[in-house]
Amino acid sequence: MFDRFTKGCCNSHLKAFVILVVFSLHFVQALNQKSPSALTVVESPESTVEDEGEETEIVEVVQPTHLWQTLKPGQGVPTGSHVRLNLQTGQREVRLGEEQLKYLGDKHRQVEDHQQAHSFSTQELKNALKKFKEGVELETEEEKKAKESLRSQFRPLEELKKDMAQLDLLVETDSQVMARLVAQFNSSSATLEERLKALLDLEYLVHQVDNAQNLVSMGGLRLVVESLNSTDHRMQENTAFVLGSALSSNPVVQVEAVDSGALQKLLTLLATPRPMAVKKKVLFAVAALLRHFPFAQNHFLKLGGLQVLGELFRSAGGGALRVRVVTMLYDMIMEKELISQTGLDIIPDTAHQERLRQYSQISLLPALAEQGWCSLVPELLDSPEHDWREKALRALLAMLRPCQGQFRQDRGLGATLGALREQYQELVVIETSLGEEGGYFGEILDLLDTLVLRLK
Ligand SMILES: *[C@@H]1O[C@H](CO)[C@@H](O)[C@H](O)[C@H]1NC(C)=O
Ligand SMILES: *[C@@H]1O[C@H](CO)[C@@H](O)[C@H](O)[C@H]1NC(C)=O
């Protein structure tokens, strides 16, 4: 995932410092404050540091600076230091903790007011030493020496800042990433390509329920819905894709999407000529919007959704869009059926009563018959795909109530069912001879038998 979001931003320096863990260690005994040297021997070490599964005694405490320095086995660090694992070298590295760095910054400003600074890094060094030596004055020679050696290690502050910015980037949270992507998508200076890319990155994130809800609260969902209006086909496709993924099993997003007029826009996209790729994603978004959301389903019917889907089915030729449309309708029928059935088993509570009431207002089956679906769905049986035929059969069974009369009179359907039965009886014989009782073809044959029986 990091790969995805740090791509294009990383120089080789950052790659050399891919950091798995940045953490503070709080286990080392207070360092000996009397010693003027940078390294201090701890006289009776009880704390230990883990090194590749082994416990190593701490024999030295390293005095951290601004710079990352490598920790050798047996070296410990003062409380509050930052320790990280360098994945390239497999070694631990230490530097001053955030608090201490901040302290340095403040002290630096005060000192500068009083005396001429030799250089920024020298002042920092002085303060670092003061902080850790707590008032112990250094011998001039030693001070000079220490300064010189540390100064040679100092990198320019700008470089340091860059490092820290990159560190921040690595630990960017999902919501930070999303805020960045939404800003990029909303930016008037971003190119179309950049905006399309931002959408795809968002799509990846909104599969997580929390992220999708975050998108709602940061106003990103409304932006996405508005962009369904774009005249660019790829923009239509990508916005519908983000929307569909954010909507999936996410009631908060579903409510917001209906509220921002997404359904009307999606249906408009479906009803007008578009490339197949756009229609597929739009249909995906519509299905996700309606699932387990009777309010939206009712709205869908009122907006003429079934008619739009009918046009889509007719214009889709033999394409996969037809089976998707039928599957979506089947899911809606079954959803309502299941709700009414579970009502028989459970102790009714008010939420369930309300759900029942909402579903009862959706007259999906009569509307399907009215819109000609009793003759449309049988067309799917002509497909050579077993899977498509299976879905068509299930849908036909689910639509029996309003369509039974029409099915019985449909000679074409009768002939198709007869031919398919023969075909699947043969396939079941083969299936059984291969040792597979109750296999997939057996399942399809059962559906055929049931349907034929119900149409007698
Ligand atoms: C998008 O940009 C407009 C204008 O710059 C701004 O008013 C709006 O708040 C932005 N929306 C989001 C969700 O960032
Ligand atoms: C987007 O399209 C809808 C119709 O679907 C229209 O009412 C609305 O004004 C359009 N918005 C923009 C910003 O073009």
Image (cartoon, rainbow, N blue to C red):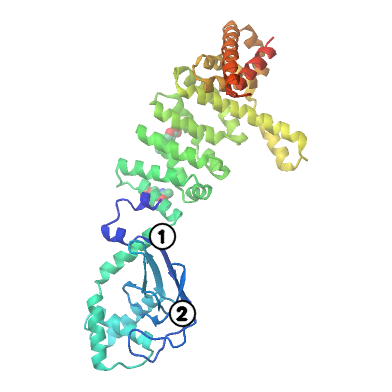
Residue 116: percent from the left, percent from the top?
23, 86
- The correct choice, above or below, for 158 with respect to 335 in the image is below
Q: Name the residue beneath numbered marker 1.
A: 171
Q: Quadrant of residue 453?
A: top right
Residue drawn at point x = 58 percent, y = 7 percent: 415
Residue type highlighted by circle 1: Val
Q: Give the structural element (helix, strand or loop) at label 2.
A: loop
Residue at image x 59%, y 31%? 297
Horizontal side, residue 271 vs residue 157: left or right? right
Q: Would residue 330 be visible to someone looking at this image? A: yes
Position above or below: 448 against 96: above
- Confirm whether residue 231 shows in the render: no
Task: Identify the amino acid type marked 2.
Answer: Val
Q: How many marks?
A: 2
Question: Is residue 223 depicted above or below 112 in this figure?
Answer: above
**Looking at the image, which is closer to me, 144 or 275?**
144
Q: Which residue is mark 2?
A: 28
Q: Residues within 10 Å of mark 1 (few under 14, many from 20)?
A: some
The earlier-in-sequence mark between 2 and 1 is 2
Distance from disc 2 to disc 1, alpha carbons, whole Å, reads: 26 Å
Element at label 1? loop
Quarter of the image where one finds residue 273: top left
Q: Assign the C terminus to one quadrant of the image.
A: top right
* Residue 337 shown left or right of residue 175 in the figure: right
Which residue occupies 47% across, 39% down? 243
Image quarter for ligand 2 equals top left
Task: Please provide percent x and percent y for residue 144.
Answer: 23, 88
Residue 24 lies, in percent from the top left, at 44, 72
